[in-house]
């Protein structure tokens, strides 16, 4: 356990030193405060819009940003150390491969989690001071919790990439492709499936397909509870299929645990 | 002292088709310094990785302190092993002290010990600076400090003196001698280093995964049967040739293409010297046994010749088979 904490502490401080924590927090805070105040600008009004619209807009932005940030933060954690030779050195220490991986995960995961909490939490506080409505915390709490899980999930996926390739530049390329597939292409493919093939997929089938993509689960978690007028496209269909929040959160947690377990497995098989 | 600290029995490692190391048998005792020599790709690093337990042998057995180093049981031994990899660039954005503290903590030591080690390698003045500002020699010193964490019983050093200036090299060998007298064993891995001779007890010469020779330097010299170089100088500008013209025995040792030098086999050294000393106008005499580099080159050359012969035989046989 001491070893894990040593590694986690180092990774966390790296995140502080590289200004990752500060910049992610700032991005999230600016976005969420901006959306909170100017979200209604599109409909011609300035001022605080309804809570559900705000969270809907935040979720649709976070769904692109969080995976990208998590992948950027972690894609080189292993391949980078392999290139500089420190990975080989670390493995000669009394430190197991799983300890190293979990330590890194805790360290880098804390950066993502803390940034999400501080960034989005700031706008929740702002809203609370304006309205004094405690519902804000419940809605934002769920949003922030699921956003953290989404970030952790992509940290695990980044480790998978980092452990599977032998060059840093390749890892960067794969990270970008992964982001594109999960955040953009998957939904387009689903939509094409819905529109292109009549009676191709049932509503149930569609929801099940969506479980294959953590970004879609995140969307479902945050949009399911909102007025359906704010939600369009394939998502609206899926929402009507109705999965409980607990099921969705569990699916998201599975998306954190599975890539991480697989990463440990790959790491153990890897020869240096 | 009875059980060797490190022992390899017929140990080998092959990747797919390539034999990185084949049937290696060796042992290392406590307080012994072993030099491991060979070209790039000779299997030095593979052997180190086997001993470190980072990879498992595909054949034979490896034991460190009586336990297979890749097993879980060897876990507690790992903090007693120090390793300096060949090419390591430490976390550039951290300071030297932060890097060393991280590694010390992983081995269960504190920052205080890390500072002590930085003092030992002489880079305390730069410990608050980021590693990316370090010169090659300073990085190497940091790497050495890292290997010295926790007074290891076994040290594996891959190219330890690369990039070190002469003073740092001298300090490094001093540290090696010191560790040795404390009972630590050291494996020094290197292309041939000038100046390493007096610090190693035994040498191993590897080439393409095979052991070419192993033994103390004098044993290797004996095996190689390399001649001793004798350079006498005479009082009256007299050439060596004319001085020894009447001694046919000495004449036979005259080096080809090298003036005023006799190349004498080790066993004839004393008799040749005695004869030379009888010469009246002898002013000075310089005797030099073959050094490590010459021994190394001898074994490599021999190996190359024998592999060439084998290949030729094989191709001849193949031709015969065709016709």
Image: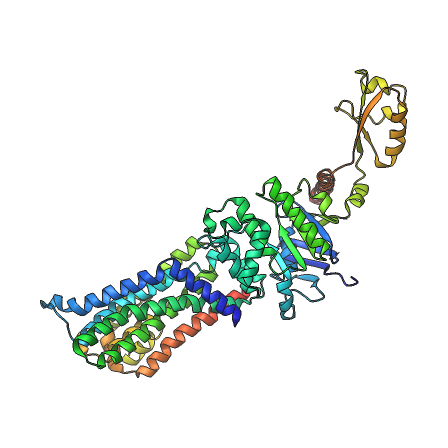
Q: x and y percent of residue B259 in the render?
A: 76, 22
Q: x and y percent of residue B12 in the render?
A: 68, 58
Query: Does residue B293 appear anywhere in the picture?
Result: yes
Q: Which residue sits at x=52%, y=60%?
A: B101
Judging depth in this view, the residue of A254 and A53 nearest the camera is: A53
Question: On the picture, is B71 further left or further right than A196?
Answer: right
**A131 lies above or below A20:** below
Q: Which residue sits at x=33%, y=83%?
A: A246
Question: On the picture, is A48 further left or further right than B137?
Answer: left
Q: x and y percent of residue B117 in the render?
A: 58, 55
- Tell me how the rendering is colored: rainbow
Question: On the picture, is B296 further left or further right than A187?
Answer: right
Q: Which residue sits at x=70%, y=59%?
A: B11
The C terminus of chain A sits in image quarter:
bottom right
Residue A136 lies in quadrant:
bottom left
Residue A116 lies in quadrant:
bottom left
Judging depth in this view, the residue of B111 and A145 nearest the camera is: B111
**A36 lies above or below B20:** below
Q: How many marks?
A: 0
Query: Does residue A177 appear anywhere in the picture?
Result: no
Judging depth in this view, the residue of A53 and A114 nearest the camera is: A114
Residue at the extreme left = A44
Q: x and y percent of residue A95 in the render?
A: 56, 66
Residue B280 lies in quadrant:
top right
Q: Which residue sits at x=66%, y=61%?
A: B57
């Amino acid at each position: 356990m001491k070893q894990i904490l040593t590694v986690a502490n180092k990774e966390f401080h790296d995140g502080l030193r590289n200004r990752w924590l500060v910049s992610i927090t700032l991005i999230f805070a600016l976005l969420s405060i901006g959306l909170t105040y100017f979200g209604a600008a599109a409909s011609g009004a300035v001022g605080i819009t309804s809570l559900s619209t705000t969270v809907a807009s935040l979720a649709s932005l976070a769904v692109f940003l969080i995976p990208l940030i998590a992948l950027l933060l972690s894609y080189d954690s292993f391949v980078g150390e392999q290139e500089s030779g420190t990975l080989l050195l670390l493995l000669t220490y009394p430190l197991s491969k799983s300890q190293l991986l979990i330590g890194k995960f805790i360290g880098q995961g804390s950066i993502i989690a803390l940034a999400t909490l501080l960034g989005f939490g700031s706008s929740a506080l702002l809203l609370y001071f304006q309205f004094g409505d405690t519902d804000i915390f419940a809605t934002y709490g769920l949003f922030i919790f699921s956003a953290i899980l989404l970030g952790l999930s992509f940290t695990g996926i980044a480790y998978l990439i980092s452990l599977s390739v032998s060059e840093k530049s390749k890892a960067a390329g794969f990270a970008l492709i992964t982001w594109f597939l999960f955040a953009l292409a998957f939904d387009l493919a689903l939509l094409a499936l819905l529109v292109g093939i009549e009676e191709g997929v049932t509503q149930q089938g569609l929801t099940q397909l969506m479980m294959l993509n953590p970004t879609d689960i995140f969307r479902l978690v945050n949009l399911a509870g909102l007025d359906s007028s704010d939600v369009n496209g394939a998502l609206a269909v899926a929402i009507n299929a109705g999965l409980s929040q607990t099921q969705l959160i569990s699916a998201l947690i599975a998306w954190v645990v599975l890539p991480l377990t697989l990463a440990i497995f790959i790491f153990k098989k890897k020869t240096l | 002292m009875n059980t060797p600290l490190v022992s390899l029995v017929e140990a080998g490692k092959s990747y797919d088709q390539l034999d990185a190391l084949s049937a290696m048998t060796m042992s290392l005792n406590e307080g012994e310094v072993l030099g491991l020599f060979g070209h790039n790709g000779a299997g030095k690093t593979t052997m180190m990785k086997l001993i470190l337990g980072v990879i498992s042998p595909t054949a034979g057995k490896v034991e460190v302190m009586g336990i297979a180093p890749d097993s879980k049981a060897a876990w507690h031994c790992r903090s007693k092993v120090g390793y300096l990899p060949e090419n390591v660039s430490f976390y550039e954005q951290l300071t030297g002290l932060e890097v060393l503290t991280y590694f010390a903590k992983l081995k269960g030591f504190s920052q205080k010990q890390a500072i002590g080690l930085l003092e030992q390698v002489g880079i305390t003045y730069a410990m608050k600076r980021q590693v990316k500002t370090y010169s090659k020699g300073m990085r190497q010193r940091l790497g050495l400090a890292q290997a010295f964490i926790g007074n290891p019983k076994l040290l594996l050093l891959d190219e330890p003196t690369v990039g070190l200036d002469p003073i740092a090299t001298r300090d490094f060998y001093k540290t090696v001698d010191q560790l040795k007298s404390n009972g630590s064993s050291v494996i020094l891995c290197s292309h041939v280093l000038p100046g390493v001779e007096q610090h190693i007890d035994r040498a191993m010469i590897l080439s393409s995964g095979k052991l070419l020779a192993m033994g103390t330097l004098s044993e290797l010299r004996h095996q190689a049967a390399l001649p001793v170089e004798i350079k006498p100088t005479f009082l009256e500008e007299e050439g060596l040739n004319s001085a020894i013209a009447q001694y046919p025995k000495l004449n036979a040792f005259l080096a080809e293409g090298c003036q005023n030098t006799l190349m004498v086999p080790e066993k004839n050294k004393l008799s040749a010297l005695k004869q030379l000393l009888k010469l009246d106008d002898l002013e000075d005499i310089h005797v030099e046994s073959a050094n490590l580099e010459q021994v190394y080159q001898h074994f490599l050359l021999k190996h190359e010749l024998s592999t060439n012969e084998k290949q030729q035989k094989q191709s001849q046989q193949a031709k015969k088979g065709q016709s």
